[in-house]
Image: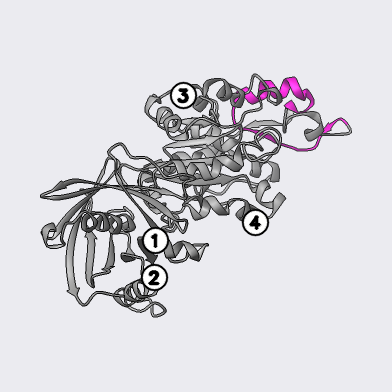
Amino acid sequence: MFGIGPEWLLHNGQPIADATVLSHPEQLDRLDAACPEAVPTAVLAGDPCYDRLLAALPHRERFRRALGVGPGQRLIVLNSTWNPDSLFGDGGSDEILPSLLPRLTAELPADEYRAVAVLHPNIWYGHGPGQIRAWLDRARRAGLALVPPLEGWRQALIAADCVLGDHGSVTFYAAALGTPVLLGAFPHQNLDPHSPVAALGRAAPKLRPYAPLRPQLDAVIERHRPGRYAALAAQTSSDPGRSAALLRQVFYRLMGIPEPPHPALLDPLPLPRYEPAERTAPLRVLTRLLGADPAEIGVTRYADPPYDPAGPYGDALHTAVHEDTQDPARLALADVIVRYGAADDPRLGPPEIWASEVLTRHPHCSVAAYISAPDRCTVCMRDGSLIRLTADPGADGRPDLGDPAAYASALHAWTGSGKSLGELGGTMTVVTGDIRHRLRVQVQVQVDRIG
């Protein structure tokens, strides 16, 4: 049993530590079975990591927005612990993970899902940050966010709609918080069958790695019931919310000095910086005209799919490519070229100048879109039209967090169907999955055809 056997706790038959801190009484029973000599040193002091998670739960929506996840979108957190039997290990899942990562971003519609990866620090330091980023490069270019190894994972866990993980503590914390869990790897044979982690392995659904991913993830989320893992949550901490006080008591007792009079408190989880998905992999975009008066266009985008996606309505299909794509040759095939940056970035010039240059440089491209904020972009079309697209704020007054590149694709679909900008009447609704983005359309200028 990892961490509580005599090889970890004893030296010459005597306990190494003056205090062996346990988070729950069930661990005391297992300690007594595995290493009875250490039982006199055992102290129950809760779990400070779990306490920080519980305290930060009211900020879930803030953490979601920090990752660019808006209402109606689903956040999938991929988690792996560090040993060979983990999801990222080489003891059984090695044939699964290389295909799982790009499939996660290619099979899930880009505007309906956000994917992030949380990897154990030992993976980072065992292989090196450069190797980790190289292994995940394709998925990252398709929109996967890689959470730093020490900070940010707790916030991502709170924000998650589903955690695809293994037998590591992060996946267990997710279940304890009541988050839907899908197990991609789980070495039952290497775990104490009486441990809470082993109980999670028996209770949580298992990934079918070669079956389509989206139906499995959706089923786990939609069939999840509150309290499913309540028994596991009850075994996470001996005294939820009080670990700081209990630990300080232990520390000062060992030092033999009185505790300070002020309360023992844990640092709150900080709000991460805003980091929405920015996909530099080419996107295959399905569009359909849902309505003409008022204008309503459906958009479904897939990042770097291995084959052209099929839509249920015989949808029109085009390619949108980030200007910084890894393969510049893809720009020659793009119908829409996009760029993200501040409107006043002096390196690129005003958005309309950049867009005009792009259309001149790439004569087969129809639309160039400069995304300058989470809710707006400037679009230049081959006929010289310059359009500002601005999404209306949500019902709570906060900015819409849809990707404005999808709005540029919707505009391309509108004009490609033979409709004029004048027929929009100054507004347009873009539908991505179950999400409706209402846009204001401002035609700024119309000059001579470009190129």
Q: Distance between the residues labelled 2 and 1?
A: 9 Å
Q: What residue type is labelled 4?
A: Pro
* In-image side of 104 versus 199 (left or right): left
Q: Residue 240 carries which label?
A: none
Label 1, secondary structure: give it: loop
Report crowding for label 1: few under 14, some 14 to 19, many 20 or more residues within 10 A (C-alpha): many
Per the image, the residue denoted by label 2 is: 362
N-terminal label among 2 and 1? 1
Q: Distance between the residues labelled 2 and 3?
A: 57 Å
Q: Residue furthest right?
A: 12
Report crowding for label 4: few under 14, some 14 to 19, many 20 or more residues within 10 A (C-alpha): some
* In-image side of 134 versus 163 (left or right): right
Is residue 23 covered in magenta? yes
Q: Which amino acid does label 3 sit on?
A: Ala
Asked if the residue under mark 1 is in contact with the one under mark 2, i.e. CB atoms within 8 Å, the reply is yes
N-terminal label among 3 and 1? 3
- In front: mark 4 or mark 3? 4
Per the image, the residue denoted by label 4 is: 129
What percent of the width, then of the height, locates residue 174? 50, 35
Per the image, the residue denoted by label 3 is: 230
Along the line of sight, which residue is nearer the eye, 226 or 390?
390
Report crowding for label 2: few under 14, some 14 to 19, many 20 or more residues within 10 A (C-alpha): some
Q: What residue type is labelled 2?
A: His
N-terminal label among 4 and 1? 4
Query: From which residue to which does the magenta span run?
Result: 13-39
- In front: mark 4 or mark 1? 1
Q: Distance between the residues labelled 4 and 3?
A: 36 Å
Q: Work out whether residue 53 can be spotted.
A: yes
